[in-house]
Amino acid sequence: MYNIIRKKRDGFELSREEITKFVKEYTDGKICDYQASALLMAICIKGMTARETSDLTTAMANSGDTVDLSGLGSLSADKHSTGGVGDKTSLIVLPIAAALGCKVAKMSGRGLGHTGGTVDKLESIPGYETAISPEKLIEQTKKVGIALASQSGNLTPADKKIYALRDVTGTVESIPLIASSIMSKKIASGAQNIVLDVKVGSGAFMKSIDDARDLANAMVEIGKASGRNVRAILTNMDIPLGNAVGNSLEVIEAIEILKGNGDKNLLDICCVLAANMASMAVGFDEEKALSLAYESVENGSALLKFREWIEAQGGDGRIVDNYSLLGKASVEKEIKSEISGYITKMDAEKIGNICVDLGGGRKTKEDKIDHTAGIILVKKTGDKVEKGEVIARVYTNKEDVVIKAAEDFLNAIEIADKKPEMQKLIYEVVK
Ligand code: URA
């Protein structure tokens, strides 16, 4: 390890053997944290070549169990978001992609920091079982077109250990480390066709388009080297996605979108993601895939798929028509604007953190989530507000956090006289 650390520190390329040895021995507990930290910091500062990043990914993907989706043939498709605030796209994209013929057997994570996780959102549905066996995952996907489980205990154990170390050593923000972390999990999860939603902006890990593009290119290259079809879509995360932030609130918003209601921007992103999955997996041309995606929402087939999926996994499908089955927080507070003007900025990261304070996320791994806690954004960037008008509503079961949440929310937004220029929602597709 001593020589490997010095080699990377001095800017040289590590061999496949050196990278594989590091990953294997660190996972097995044979390398201590301080040496692993030193190497991660050297990688953070000196970077990695495409070959090194690909070797790191392969070693991490092979560090534990892998899921064999060959039974789903070329139709297997997966989607991954690099993490955002109010990002409920999986709940909408999967039913649309399945309605178009994709087979989506997906492993998802829980919330991380200020960003939410799909497994937490789904667990707000009474009865939904996230811990299912690989056999059930595949059988259900064959039958319904969708199954979504929490990551199995032994999927990419190397990533679990390395990620936990990066989290406390200032080595999260490194393109080769993020790319290998994400792609190792996607490759181990088995899908042939993978769409990556790379978030850019204040609520995302990547704050600039250039960094996001570099990350997207790195992940697409890793995919190619492993024989997978990968596309990355760069999307805006300067403002939270849609109007709901918080687990059960986001489930309701997702169902509303599938019913053809709600935020048009959110529907547009979801249709683009699903269309890219279907064009790779089913073979539609891109334009046709996009029009079929919108059609599946208009004709109700995507909503039907959503209900079928939830019920197949033990969830109460009646939530589609009766949101009260998801429960409701005991405290609800309206946040009113103190001035008139246009909302020019909403800090997505701060809003994500307020949701955590309300109980909707975890501060430590052991924290229990309050699924009903969260925020509804009544107004968003670009909207005009009058003094005293409601701009958001917060929901929690913790009476004592409400006043601070309201104050923090007002500090997370900016209001000015001039209407801001509307930002792009989808920046580019990297293939
Ligand atoms: N998500 C991951 O899974 N890994 C990272 O390193 C960053 C975001």
Image (spheres, rainbow, N blue to C red):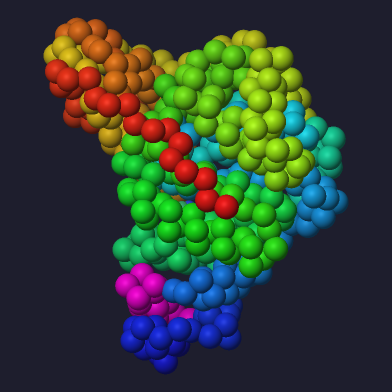
Relative to 194, 263 lies left or right: left
User: Can residue 258 be seen from the camera position used here?
Assistant: yes
* Picture residue at 36% right of the left edge, 83% below the top: 11
User: Can residue 90 be seen from the camera position used here?
Assistant: no
Counting from the top left corner in percent of width and height, residue 113 is at 39, 45
Taking depth in this image into account, of 339 and 373 the one nearest to the observer is 339
Relative to 310, 57 lies left or right: left
Helix, strand or loop for the magenta stretch, by majority: helix
Query: Taking 264 as reference, is 358 above or below it?
Result: below
* Picture residue at 33% right of the left edge, 86% below the top: 10
Q: Residue 296 falls in which quadrant of the image? A: top right
Query: Taking 329 as reference, is 386 above or below it?
Result: above
Q: Is residue 46 magenta?
A: yes
Total marks shown come to 0
Relative to 219, 348 lies left or right: left
Q: Is residue 33 magenta?
A: yes
Query: Taking 66 as reference, is 336 above or below it?
Result: above
Counting from the top left corner in percent of width and height, residue 7 is at 40, 88
Which residue is the extreme one toward the bottom? 3
Quadrant showing the N terminus: bottom left
* Picture residue at 47% right of the left edge, 24% below the top: 265
Taking depth in this image into account, of 171 and 331 the one nearest to the observer is 171
Q: Which residues are magenta?
A: 30-47
Counting from the top left corner in percent of width and height, residue 241 is at 43, 30
Q: Residue 389 falls in which quadrant of the image? A: top left
Query: Taking 377 as reference, is 175 above or below it?
Result: below
Taking depth in this image into account, of 323 and 193 the one nearest to the observer is 193
* Picture residue at 14% right of the left edge, 18% below the top: 417
Taking depth in this image into account, of 337 and 365 the one nearest to the observer is 337
Counting from the top left corner in percent of width and height, residue 87 is at 48, 34
